[in-house]
Image: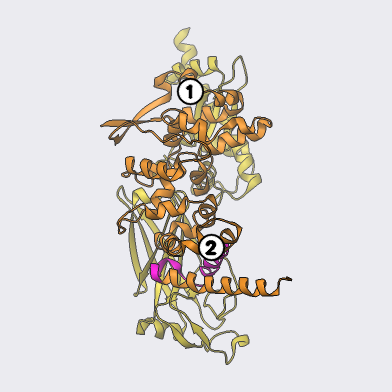
Chain colours: A orange, B yellow
Amino acid sequence: MSALTIFKSTFVNALRSSITANLDKYLRDDVWVSETSTRSAREMQTGVEVAEPLSLELPVDGDHKDTENAIRFHKALRHLTPLQARDPRLWTRLAHVELWPYMRLRWDASKHMANRDRAARFVETRYFVAQSQSRALLRHGIARLWWTAELSHDPDRENPYELTTVLLSTLDITQQIVERGMGRAKNIIRGFLAFLLANSEMLLTGGDKNRARIRRLAKHLNMYGGVCVLDLLSQTEITDVLAKELDRIRASESADDEEAPA
Amino acid sequence: MRLSARSYPHPVLGNRDDVPGAAFQAALEMSTDKECVYIAADVACSCETLNALLKDGRAAYVLHVECSNTLFRRAYEFREPQHRISIGADDLNDAVEVNVFVRATDRIGDYRIPEAHSDYAGAAFDIQRGDILAVGEGQVFHIESDFDSLSRIGSIMQINESPKDGDIPMEPSFDGDKIVIFLSKSDFADYKVLKLHEGVRGPLTTTIVLPVLVEAIHILKEESEGMDDTRRWVRALARRIESLGLSGESQPLLLAQKLLELPVKRALSSSRMLAWASS
């Protein structure tokens, strides 16, 4: 067991305010952040213990390994409290030191360097927790892995991370459910993902039609949450609401198909 | 859950003029200790229809708590008008939004409110379990769990070394939760040594903090009233000004000096002592 090291807030502020000056360093493969200051000015140890050094699978050939990494990372830091898990000092440190090789491949700044302002914004969003709102955590390269697993983790399932696999199967699902406020309520996100899983042939096999269905389901649930306190419904009640809407969606698709000229 | 006035498919007490003949109010209070955050609700409902449903158990009060900073969102159902909940201090941080509702706990097939707007006269509604029947005015609380609130004005500011080289002027950044003042590398080295000496702390405050605080007050006055700003320093500064009864002071320079408790006087006093000691 070893204690997790984080950056000091003064160092995080200095690093963040130097993104433009350091932009070319975000293209380097080696960990360069130690060149910018002394260890005592940069680092502090926490009381958070980790069983083994943190590492993530590196993306290969277009496979981002998001699901594998979210599960692996969440298991390694399962005991973080929400207050600890929203701390920019932790995520900035991991993105720049321990998990730098992963960040270089998964969130490669070189793709944006044609426009340096855009590249700087990309670095700020993916390597730093730019604001105190949840969206910043869900966009940070490492924090998003922990938080998506945390929100979809269901200890009552035989595989507690089964819904995490559904959530991260496409980026669209994450945006539709997690970035909306309702995705923070565990019964709602679990009910939504369980419904997608139970209807995977109609919803999770890819294609524009399925993506449009997921978007319409998320939109309907969000609108229904405007008149009903979804947080106090059971998962079964959530899936019932979605089942009725999916029937309506499929009926409207059939009507559209019939109306379409041959 | 951000609640705005909206059009519900049925009359909702507390929403616009849906039910002008009755009122629904929830007084909310928040307190904290090291372990927990406590939220107490005291609800008053003057609608006889809803009170009857609450009494019969076909409706219930709901306290809805949401914190964007820690992605916390939970609803607590209760039956008595006074209710208090506790939430772990590790679950909440910064802005916490609290709303109070009445929701149907059962399907109500023939829902009518005599006190409703005349547009609803004679209409009956099919209410589903979970549907909102009343809304109170929401409130946002701010929890500064890892932040020294304004016992000293310096706690909203942080002095850092600038990443830029050379003799450059100090440069404040107002974008984050704290105001960060960047000093050139050589100035920061001097500052680190000098701040340890009691005799020069006053002049240092005047030289570094006073002008930045004046600029911060300008920003506070220009951008908003402060309490709803997402940056902690803005909210903390607005609270400090209010708590000291200085809201009426319109000149930023005078206001900053009052907040810092006459820094020029203290700087001159300590400089005089230093001058006498060295002569």
Q: Chain of mark 1?
A: A
**What's the residue at 44%, 54% (across, down)?**
A166
Q: Is residue B20 left or right of residue B32?
A: right
In the rendered image, residue A223 lying in the magenta stretch gets the answer: yes
> What chain does badge 2 belong to?
A
Where's residue B140, x and y in %?
Answer: 48, 57
Q: Position of residue B129 (x, y in %)?
A: 43, 78
Furthest residue to the bottom?
Answer: B122
B84 or B63: nearer the eye?
B63
| Nearer-N-terminus badge (1/2) | 1
Q: Mark 2 belongs to which amino acid?
A: Ala
Asked if A145 appears above or below B53 in the picture, the reply is above
Whether residue B52 is visible to the viewer of this picture, yes or no, is yes
Secondary structure that dominates the magenta span? helix
Is A229 left, or right, of B255 in this rendering?
A: left
Q: Which residues are magenta?
A: A214-236
Q: Residue furthest left?
A: A1
Q: Is disc 2 placed on a helix, strand or loop? A: helix
Where A230 sits versus B117, above or below? above
In the image, B14 versus B10, the foreground residue is B10
Give the left or right position of residue B219, taking residue B154 as reference. Answer: right
Q: Nearer the viewer, mark 1 or mark 2?
A: 2
Task: Tell me the number on the disc at residue A33.
Answer: 1
Badge 2: residue crowd in 10 Å (few <14, some 14–19, many ≥20): many
> Compared to A25, does B47 lie above or below?
below
Instruction: Name the residue rendered at 47%, 75% in the picture.
Output: B131
Give the amino acid type for the residue marked by disc 1 in the picture.
Answer: Val
Residue B32 or residue A235, whichever sits in front: A235
Name the residue beneath numbered marker 2.
Answer: A218
- The residue most toward the front is A262
